[in-house]
Image: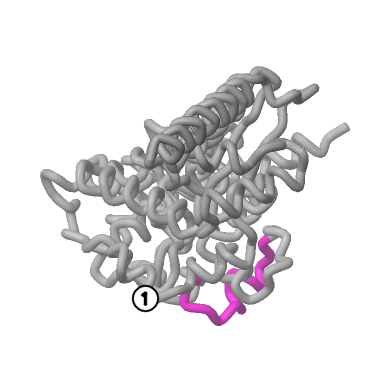
């Protein structure tokens, strides 16, 4: 019995010594720098678990003892990690890298949705900046079930990707990026319409449609309520006027030909058979033609009270407004015909 007890004591001492040595090795490794010569980025794909990721990091040479890192994570009950892109610096250690993965300290960047961008230009912006592929954008923008899930009224996402500066995690799913823009739209729309929906009590889709036209017609914030007033006057006229707004025809031409360069010609205005061609059809087009910002939405809800039915560009971002066709004809002569004749004079 004494021999047996002595053997157990020896085994415990040896085991404790071995455990102490292992603990010291793990502790030392976890606190030592990774040995990077320059900052790098690590991408964790959605659905990957910590053990798999550590194997990938070992293969890339970033982590030399993945079992040590995994053992520490298991000991602390922290094996759940967040997908995304992570910045790793030369000062990082296995311990700090594990902390980033577990805490989800993903790399964040900003992207800007500019007022008046339509779905195609925004798609290309996001694709070029590597937030999502053009194919993913189109898939979600035209996904009726996805749009319904987020309370978006219409067959496409056009008009509801709210113009804003967004700070998001790199590697975020395209669905989550869309959801963020939709949520911002609904927040702002709710604020803008909290005290009414404008002279014609438009529903969300009609309000956003008119706001998108106002957005495309002027870049001057103080003019937007006046532009909105002109379109309301045309819509309320008896008999009703056609809106005859060029941006809707550009949209129609782009639907017909994705390579359209934006150069409108008379045949577009009067020959293009499309519901977005407001030179041929009465009333609002079927849906938004761009993504309007807060000021354009506000203009539709609270337009100026004006007698005007016309406006003509003065070629400096602002317009001349006219209540009669005679006034409009004179403005066109001054600011379009004569202006461009003078600009062509050597």
Q: Is residue 186 left or right of residue 65?
A: left
Q: Is residue 210 left or right of residue 134?
A: left
Q: Quadrant of the C terminus?
A: top right
Seen at 36% across and 52% down, the residue is 211
Label 1 crowd (10 A; few <14 / some 14-19 / many >=20): few
* Of residues 285 and 65, the one drawn nearer to the viewer in this rendering: 65
| Image coords of residue 227 (percent x, y) | 38, 45
Location of residue 327 in the rendering, given as x and y in whole percent from the top left corner: 44, 46
Residue at the (48%, 61%) spot, across then down: 289
Q: Position of residue 125 (x, y in %)?
A: 63, 49
Report which quarter residue 138 is drawn in: bottom right
- Relative depth, front residue between 165 and 27: 27
The quadrant the N terminus occupies is top left
Residue 160 is one of the magenta-drawn residues = no
Q: How is the image coloured?
A: one colour
Residue extending farthest bottom: 273
Question: Residue 213: x, y in percent?
Answer: 43, 54
Q: Residue 269 or 207: which is nearer the viewer? A: 207
Was residue 268 drawn as part of the magenta stretch in this picture? yes
The stretch of residues the image draws in magenta is: 264-276
- The answer to whether residue 174 of the structure is visible from this angle is yes
Label total for image = 1
Q: Measuring 66% from the left and 45% from the top, which residue is drawn there?
A: 129
Among the 4 quarters of the image, the one containing residue 264: bottom right
Question: Residue at image x 18%, y 59%?
Answer: 200
Q: Secondary structure at mark 1?
A: helix
The residue beneath circle 1 is 145
């Amino acid at each position: 019995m004494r021999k047996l007890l002595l053997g157990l004591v020896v085994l415990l001492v040896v085991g404790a010594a071995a455990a102490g040595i292992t603990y010291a090795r793990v502790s030392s490794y976890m606190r030592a720098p990774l040995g990077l010569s320059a900052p790098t980025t690590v991408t964790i794909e959605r659905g990957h678990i910590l053990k798999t990721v550590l194997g990938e990091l070992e293969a890339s040479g970033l982590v030399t003892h993945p079992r040590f890192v995994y053992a520490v994570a298991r000991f602390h009950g922290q094996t759940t990690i967040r997908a995304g892109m992570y910045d790793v610096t030369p000062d990082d250690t296995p311990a700090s890298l594990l902390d980033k993965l577990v805490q989800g300290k993903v790399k964040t960047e900003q992207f800007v949705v500019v007022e008046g961008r339509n779905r195609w230009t925004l798609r290309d912006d996001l694709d070029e900046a590597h937030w999502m592929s053009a194919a993913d954008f189109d898939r979600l923008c035209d996904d009726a079930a996805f749009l319904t899930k987020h309370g978006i009224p219409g067959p496409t996402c056009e008009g509801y990707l709210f113009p804003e500066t967004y700070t998001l995690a790199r590697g975020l799913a395209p669905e989550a990026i869309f959801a963020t823009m939709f949520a911002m739209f609904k927040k702002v729309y709710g604020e803008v319409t909290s005290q009414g929906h404008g002279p014609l009590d438009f529903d969300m889709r009609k309000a956003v449609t008119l706001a998108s036209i106002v957005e495309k017609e002027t870049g001057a914030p103080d003019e937007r309520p006046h532009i909105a007033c002109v379109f309301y006057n045309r819509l309320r006229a008896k008999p009703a006027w056609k809106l005859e707004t060029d941006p809707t025809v550009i949209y129609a031409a782009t639907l017909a030909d994705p390579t359209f360069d934006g150069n409108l010609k008379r045949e577009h205005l009067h020959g293009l058979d499309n519901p977005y061609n407001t030179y041929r059809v009465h009333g609002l087009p079927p849906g938004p033609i761009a993504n309007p910002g807060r000021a354009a939405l506000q203009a539709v809800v609270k337009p100026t009270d004006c007698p005007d039915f016309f406006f003509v560009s003065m070629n400096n971002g602002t317009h001349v407004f006219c209540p009669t066709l005679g006034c409009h004809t004179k403005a066109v002569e001054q600011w379009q015909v004569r202006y461009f004749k003078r600009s062509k004079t050597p």
